[in-house]
Image: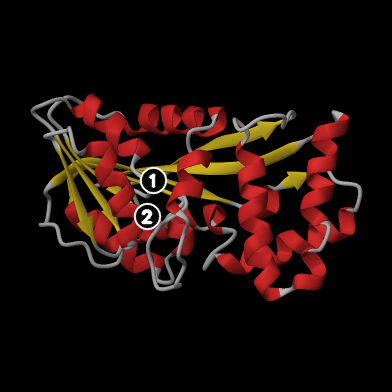
Amino acid sequence: MIGGQGGRSRVFDASHLDRMYKTAAMRAQRARTRQLLQVRPGDRVVDLGCGVGDLITELAVDVGPAGRVIGVDQQPGMLAAAAVKVRAADNCSLVLADAASLPLGDNTCDRLVAVQVFEYVPDVARALAEAFRVLTVGGRAVLVDTDWRSCVWHTDNRERTDAVLRAWESHFAHPYLPARLPRLAEASGFSEAEVYALPVVETKAHHADTYSLGMAASIERFVKRLEPDVVGGWREDVKAQAMRGTYFFSLTRFAVVLTRN
C-alpha cells in the first residue's frame, strides 16, 4: 500500500488512504497477497510500510493468539491510524522505522510483506538485505509493487493523460521496479523469485467503492504542485467518463514471492 518507507519525503493523507483501501479492488488485492504469503498460526509476521493498518488486522487473525504481527512504517500519521485498528488485538505491535534499517533481530520473523513500499525506497538492495536478515531460514517474503507503465486510463484527451502519468512517476524512487526486483532479491541471497500479476481493473465509477477515483485525486494533488498547466482539466475528464458510462481504468501490480535460503 502507499505510505511506504525510504528516503523520499512523502507525507500521505491517512484518512484519504483509509477510504481508498476499503474499496473492493484493494480488499481483493489484500486477499491475494495473504494467499501468497501463506501465513500459519503462530507465525511472527512483519508488515513493512503498514500504512493505515488494514492488512495488519487481517494478518492478526491469520497468525492467531500464538503469533505476532509487527507493523512498521516511517510516518507517525500512518502508525496513529493503524493503532486505532489494532488496539483490541493483543498480538500486534507498531514500530516507527525505515525499511533500510529495521529494529528487529536476525532470523526472528517467519513472514515479511511489503505492499507498495520498495518502489519508494532509494536503496532497494539495502532494504532487501534487511528483509533477508530478519527472516528465518525458509522464511517467506511477498513484495508487491507497481509498474506504472501498465496504467491505462480512458479519457478524451489521451495526450494530457500521458503527460499527467509521466509527471506522477516522479512520486516514486522506482516507478518501474517489478521488472528489476526479482534479480535484485536473488542478488541479496533469496532463492529464485516467483512473480504474480495483481491486476486492478475498474469499469464503473459511480460511488465511493472505486479505488481509481481516489487515486486520481492523489495524482492531481501531486502533479498540480509540479506542473499545474499539465493537470488542469484532467480529473474532470476522468469523472466525465464515469458519468457517460465509458469509464475504464487498469493497473498491474506484481507480487514478488521470495524464500530466504
Q: Please tell me how crowded label 2 is: few (under 14), some (14-19), or many (20+) other residues with Cα within 10 Å.
A: some
Q: Is residue 113 visible?
A: yes
The three-letter code of the residue at mark 2 reads Glu
Count of marks placed on residues: 2
- Residue lying furthest right: 156
Q: Residue at the location (43% across, 58% down)?
A: 118
- Residue 33 bears which disc, if any? none
Image coordinates for residue 171, horizontal then vertical, percent: 57, 66
Of residues 251 and 52, the one drawn nearer to the viewer in this rendering: 52
Of residues 186 and 68, the one drawn nearer to the viewer in this rendering: 68
Q: Is residue 20 above or below residue 157?
A: above
Residue topped by disc 2? 186
From mark 2 to mark 1, how far is it between C-alphas? Answer: 6 Å
Q: Is residue 16 left or right of residue 31?
A: right
Q: Is residue 261 visible?
A: no
SS at badge 2: helix
Q: Residue at the location (23% across, 25% down)?
A: 61
Badges 2 and 1: C-beta atoms under 8 Å apart? yes
Along the polypeptide, which appears first: circle 2 or circle 1?
A: 2
The three-letter code of the residue at mark 1 reads Glu
Q: Is residue 17 left or right of residue 123?
A: right
Q: Quadrant of residue 65?
A: top left
Residue topped by disc 1? 192
Q: Residue at the location (85% across, 60% down)?
A: 160
Image coordinates for residue 196, horizontal then vertical, percent: 51, 36
Q: Please tell me how crowded label 1 is: few (under 14), some (14-19), or many (20+) other residues with Cα within 10 Å.
A: some
Q: Is residue 170 above or below residue 233?
A: below
Image coordinates for residue 255, horizontal then vertical, percent: 47, 41
